[in-house]
Image (cartoon, rainbow, N blue to C red):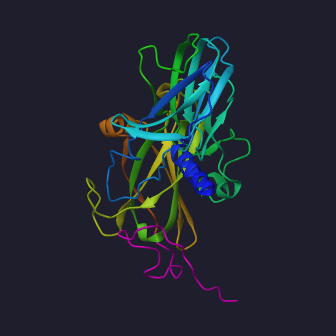
């Protein structure tokens, strides 16, 4: 009988248990951050819904930090892993411990792949940037292989993935012996939005069946941005590197003169372009051909950024035709490469006779 009573008591204890976060009532504050995941050309606003879309994954973790509003030095921080959703959208919440006082709050996702955070312990100095591309990629860029050592060094970087940041420069925490809720001066929860823009880009190509792969190099971009404000760093010019994809030869809005003309396209991220008065935006397309030779072409697209499609939709539709030369006699086999209607770029394999 005693054994049965003990078993029943243990069952009741298990049923009554509820997992709660271990917090102290003193100086403990609830914080909630909503994330805006309506990102043009990544989750919404596609130029062609049938084309390959960029990979996107909701954040796993948000870092929330409270900093001294004068110096920017971090005084308290917490990593939010609890993810929920309501009628206002997806949010992350948890508790942070901080003494009463005035703070500057900053929250951002902590699990980016190519975006790197620098100066992470200061609210005002924190920069988001990306790394330079791997050395083996640089050696495969024909247009850069001929650059003279005397020329200005060029920083070629990966494009950044999306950094969702919420900034509130004034959060007042009064003394309280109960758990309160941190809010903006307007009494709202905090909202994080991306400081990175994603652009869709396309260009026409004739002789596409002679190409095996292509990359794009866009100059005039800023290589970093301040996280708290989202403003670009104008003193950090970079060239953004991205791979191109082959599109159909009947894409919306483009006229084709023959079947070997198609488009190549991509979606890339950027912190933003440098001020127009100080630079011209140029993109170089580097192709590797099925007959072993490289082909490069550089286009000035400064005016393209001013087009209505670029301003409203972040679509860079380049009205230019790149022509890839036919293979030299006896060097190309008929049917090699790919036709404009084929999907991904394919590897070219051939036997080597020794």
338 falls in the magenta region: yes
182 falls in the magenta region: no
Residue 142 left/right relative to 30: right
Residue 14 left/right relative to 254: right
State the residue in front, 115 or 297: 115
State the residue in front, 83 or 268: 83
Outermost residue, bottom side: 354
Q: Image point 41% across, 48% down: which residue? A: 201
Q: Which residues are magenta?
A: 326-354
To which quarter of the image does residue 294 belong? bottom right
To which quarter of the image does residue 247 belong? bottom left
State the residue in front, 154 or 248: 248
Q: Image point 61% across, 86% down: which residue? A: 351
Q: In the image, residue 236 lies at what x, y percent?
A: 62, 31
Outermost residue, right side: 149
Q: Is residue 6 visible?
A: yes
Q: Image point 30% across, 36% down: which residue? A: 308
Residue 262 left/right relative to 70: left
The quadrant of the rendering that contains the C terminus is: bottom right
The quadrant of the rendering that contains the N terminus is: bottom right
State the residue in front, 328 or 286: 286
Q: Is residue 236 visible?
A: no
**Which SS type dominates the magenta stretch?**
loop
Counting the numbered discs, the total is: 0
Query: Where 287 falls versus 337 (above or below)?
Result: above
Q: In the image, residue 66 lies at what x, y percent?
A: 61, 21
Q: In the image, residue 122 lies at what x, y percent?
A: 67, 23
Q: Image point 69% across, 58% down: which residue? A: 136
């Amino acid at each position: 009988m005693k054994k049965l009573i003990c078993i029943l008591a243990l069952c009741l204890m298990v049923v009554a248990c509820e997992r709660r976060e271990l917090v102290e009532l003193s100086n403990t504050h609830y914080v909630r951050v909503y994330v805006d995941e309506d990102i043009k050309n990544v989750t919404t606003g596609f130029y062609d819904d049938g084309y390959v879309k960029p990979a996107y994954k909701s954040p796993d973790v948000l870092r929330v930090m409270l900093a001294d509003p004068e110096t920017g030095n971090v005084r308290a921080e917490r990593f939010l892993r609890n993810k929920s959703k309501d009628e206002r959208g997806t949010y992350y919440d948890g508790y942070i411990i901080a003494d009463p006082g005035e703070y500057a709050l900053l929250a951002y996702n902590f699990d980016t792949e190519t975006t790197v955070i620098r100066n992470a312990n200061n609210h005002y100095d924190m920069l988001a940037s990306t790394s330079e591309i791997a050395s083996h990629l640089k050696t495969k860029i024909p247009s850069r292989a001929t650059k003279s050592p005397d020329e200005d060094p060029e920083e070629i970087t990966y494009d950044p993935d999306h950094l969702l940041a919420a900034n509130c420069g004034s959060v007042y925490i009064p003394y309280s012996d109960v758990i309160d809720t941190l809010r903006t001066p307007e009494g709202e929860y905090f909202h994080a939005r991306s400081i990175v823009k994603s652009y869709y880009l396309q260009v026409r190509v004739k002789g596409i069946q002679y190409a095996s792969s292509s990359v794009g190099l866009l100059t005039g971009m800023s290589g970093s941005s301040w996280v708290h404000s989202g403003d670009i760093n104008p003193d950090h010019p970079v060239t953004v590197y991205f791979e191109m994809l082959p599109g159909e030869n009947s894409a919306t809005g483009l006229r084709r003169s023959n079947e070997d003309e198609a488009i190549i396209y991509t979606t890339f991220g950027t912190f933003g372009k440098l001020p127009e008065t100080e630079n011209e935006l140029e993109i170089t397309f580097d192709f590797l051909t099925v007959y072993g030779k490289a082909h490069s072409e550089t286009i000035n697209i400064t005016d393209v950024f001013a087009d209505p499609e670029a301003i409203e939709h972040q679509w860079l539709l380049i009205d230019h035709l790149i022509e890839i030369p036919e293979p030299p006699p006896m060097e190309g086999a008929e049917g090699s490469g790919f036709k404009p209607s084929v999907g991904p770029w394919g590897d070219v394999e051939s036997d080597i006779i020794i």
